[in-house]
């Protein structure tokens, strides 16, 4: 077990309320997921658990993790309700019922307000990444949702940081909670570096950072969508394979971007803080704060994208002359490193080991990962090690293959069949 699982799971299984401090990637979803399923009465087809998350990405990841944990149980229905997704299909899904609800506060409250569901049977409430939800202004929505729940319930609050408003929130919703913190045990594996840099020199330093630390996977955070897009153009012109993610993307575009990055088809992701939470990838070598975060909490969330799942990581922050006066709020006693010690090794190649193919068939077409893997191995002639992650959505699928066999896999799937059917296949 991870530290947060070891410390929190026994308390959760006893049915007690808990307020736990742990960063994303620490294994907390498994901890509260096991607790939720342990209390579930599958025969009673009512909403018994509500899990609130700050973003769509995190809600989808939590829902998928709970579904995996629930495979040993029969007919557990987990429903996701998030903003930015079509509303009417959610209403139809609620009409058919669910056991566990995972969603963002705004959309959950909207469905409650329009009486598309009720929480009369809820026995467990989970607030995941509560500090981020408060940062995003969800406090009033959360309080409104809680008023519609039975008071006799178990409440579990997880947060990466403990600002004052977290204490206020916990006092209003938790009943004599046990406090657990393992954050100090987890953050020591992140090596942080700070560089004083003029804005106009930041991009030029990135290739030297990549080669000096021999990174394979990196997330670069910018404070604005405009900066993300301009940095994307600059790195693309320098010949890097790069992705960008911000709030202008619709859900399908977000899903594709995160899938391509997670399956190692692209080595660089540029993002605003929309990706600071819910980026569930275990082996990001480096996080770069191209722009200094607006406060210490956001900085912590960004840095927490690396050193996940018991691995080490590195975080780099570029600090310009306007940021210096505020850096004490980010971290005390900062030592700035000399940029001249960064070596731009032109022979270093930051490349991804995989490429991704898009297949226009998914769960609704009864396509399964085993069907695709079977076609690639038996019909196309690939080795099992040539195939990476396979991500199946409702109407389409992404499959990662080693870049050396991309064309062979593409042509083989185009000319062959999956589960006896022909599907269109495109490179991504």
Image (tube, rainbow, N blue to C red):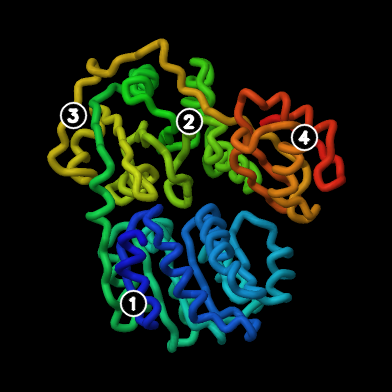
Residue assigned mark 3: 336
Residue 320: x %, y % from top left: 27, 28
Q: Which corner quadrant of the image does residue 201 belong to?
A: top left
Mark sitting earlier along the chain (1/2): 1
Identify the mark at residue 268; answer none if there is no mark: 2
Residue assigned mark 4: 425
* Distance between the alpha carbons at the discs numbered 1 and 4: 49 Å
Identify the mark at residue 269; answer none if there is no mark: none
Residue 206: x %, y % from top left: 38, 22
Residue 179: x %, y % from top left: 26, 72
Q: Nearer the viewer, residue 92 or 420?
A: 420
Disc 3 to disc 4: CB gap under 8 Å: no
Where disc 3 sits, the SS reads strand
Mark nearest the camera among 3 and 2 is 2
- What residue is rendered at 37% in x and 71% in y? 9
* Distance between the alpha carbons at the discs numbered 3 and 1: 42 Å
Q: Residues within 10 Å of mark 3 (few under 14, many from 20)?
A: few
Q: Is residue 381 left or right of residue 194?
A: right
- What residue is rendered at 40% in x and 59% in y? 27
Q: Is residue 141 visible?
A: no
Q: Is residue 380 above or below residue 94?
A: above
Q: Is residue 161 left or right of residue 406?
A: left
Mark sitting earlier along the chain (4/2): 2
């Amino acid at each position: 077990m991870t530290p947060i699982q070891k410390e929190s799971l026994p308390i959760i299984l006893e049915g007690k309320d808990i307020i736990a401090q742990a960063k994303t990637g620490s294994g907390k979803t498994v901890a509260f997921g096991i607790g939720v399923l342990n209390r579930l009465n599958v025969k009673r087809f009512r909403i018994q658990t509500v899990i609130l998350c700050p973003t769509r990405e995190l809600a989808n990841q939590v829902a998928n993790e709970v579904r995996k944990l629930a495979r040993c149980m029969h007919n557990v229905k987990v429903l996701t309700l998030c903003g930015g997704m079509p509303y009417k299909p959610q209403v139809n899904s609620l009409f058919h019922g669910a056991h566990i609800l995972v969603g963002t506060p705004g959309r959950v409250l909207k469905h409650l307000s329009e009486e598309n569901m009720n929480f009369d049977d809820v026995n467990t409430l989970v607030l995941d990444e509560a500090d981020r939800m408060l940062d995003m202004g969800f406090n009033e929505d959360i309080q409104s949702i809680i008023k519609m729940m039975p008071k006799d319930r178990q409440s579990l609050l997880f947060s990466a940081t403990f600002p004052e408003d977290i204490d206020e929130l916990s006092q209003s919703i938790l009943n004599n909670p046990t406090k657990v913190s393992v954050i100090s045990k987890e953050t020591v594996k992140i090596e942080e570096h700070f560089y004083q840099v003029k804005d106009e020199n930041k991009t030029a330093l990135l290739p030297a950072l990549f080669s000096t630390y021999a990174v394979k996977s990196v997330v670069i955070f910018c404070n604005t969508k405009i900066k993300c897009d301009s940095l994307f153009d600059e790195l693309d012109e320098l010949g890097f394979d790069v992705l960008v993610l911000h709030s202008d993307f619709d859900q399908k575009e977000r899903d594709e971007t995160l899938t391509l990055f997670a399956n190692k088809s692209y080595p660089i992701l540029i993002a605003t803080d929309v990706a600071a939470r819910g980026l569930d990838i275990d082996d990001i070598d480096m996080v770069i704060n191209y722009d200094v975060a607006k406060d210490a909490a956001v900085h912590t969330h960004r840095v927490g994208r690396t050193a996940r799942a018991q691995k080490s990581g590195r975080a780099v922050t570029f600090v310009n002359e306007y940021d210096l006066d505020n850096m004490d709020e980010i971290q005390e006693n900062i030592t700035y490193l000399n940029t001249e010690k960064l070596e731009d090794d032109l022979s270093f190649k930051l490349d991804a080991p995989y490429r991704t193919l898009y297949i226009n068939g998914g769960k609704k077409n009864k396509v399964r990962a085993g069907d695709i893997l079977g076609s690639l191995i038996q019909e196309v002639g690939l080795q099992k090690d040539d195939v990476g992650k396979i991500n199946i959505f409702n109407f389409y699928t992404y499959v990662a293959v080693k870049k050396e066999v991309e064309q062979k896999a593409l042509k083989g799937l185009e000319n062959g069949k999956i589960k006896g059917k022909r599907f269109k296949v495109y490179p991504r």
